[in-house]
Amino acid sequence: MTTPLEIELAAHIAERFPQSVPGGSVYGSVDAVMVGSDLHGLALKVVQKNPLDDLELQQLMDMISGLASSMWAFPLRARPYYARLLLLATLIFDSSVPDDFEA
């Protein structure tokens, strides 16, 4: 059975990086290129049933917060791409923390 995380990871892999975002750009608190790469790595780890360590969980929470608070700063045409990354980050979090986790 394919999980929502696996579905969104596959969609992220298939989606092209937005042309309206120059490489090396930072929007709000988000490195526009690295956030996708970092989330890809975390998603693969979780899909492979490997737990995230405390540092990775903290980085993931920072990425979720950064994406959510910086969405307004991305070029309008790039926002769907980063909205998908926010969804992917949330699914990684939901799939990797125990039900009784408190941030």
Image: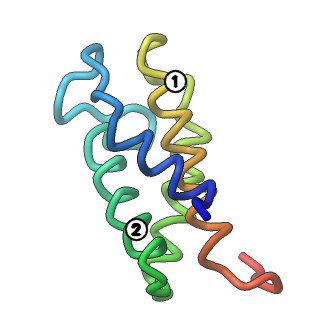
Mark linked to residue 42: 2
Pointer 2 local density, CA inside 10 Å: few below 14, some 14–19, many at least 20:
many
Residue 84 vs residue 53, the one in the foreground: 84
Residue 64 vs residue 27, the one in the foreground: 64
Q: Which residue occupies 44% across, 82% down? A: 55
Indicate the position of residue 73 as horizontal and vertical percent values.
48, 24
Q: Which residue occupies 45% across, 68% down? A: 59
Rounded to the nearest angstrom, the CA distance separating label 2 from label 1 is 20 Å
For residue 47, side relative to residue 22 (left or right): right
Q: Determine whether the residue tagged by mark 1 lies in a helix, strand or loop.
A: helix
Is 9 above or below relative to 27? below
Q: Residue beneath label 1, please? A: 80
Q: Determine whether the residue tagged by mark 2 lies in a helix, strand or loop.
A: helix
Q: Which residue occupies 47% across, 71% down? A: 47
Indicate the position of residue 11 as horizontal and vertical percent values.
44, 39
Q: Which residue occupies 58% across, 59% down? A: 2
Q: Quadrant of the C terminus?
A: bottom right
Residue 14 vs residue 23, the one in the foreground: 14
Res 38 → quadrant: bottom left
Indicate the position of residue 36 as horizontal and vertical percent values.
35, 47
The residue sitting at the right extreme is: 100
Indicate the position of residue 24 as horizontal and vertical percent values.
18, 36
Residue type at mark 1? Pro
Is 48 above or below relative to 8? below
For residue 9, side relative to residue 26 (left or right): right
Res 42 → quadrant: bottom left
Residue type at mark 2? Leu
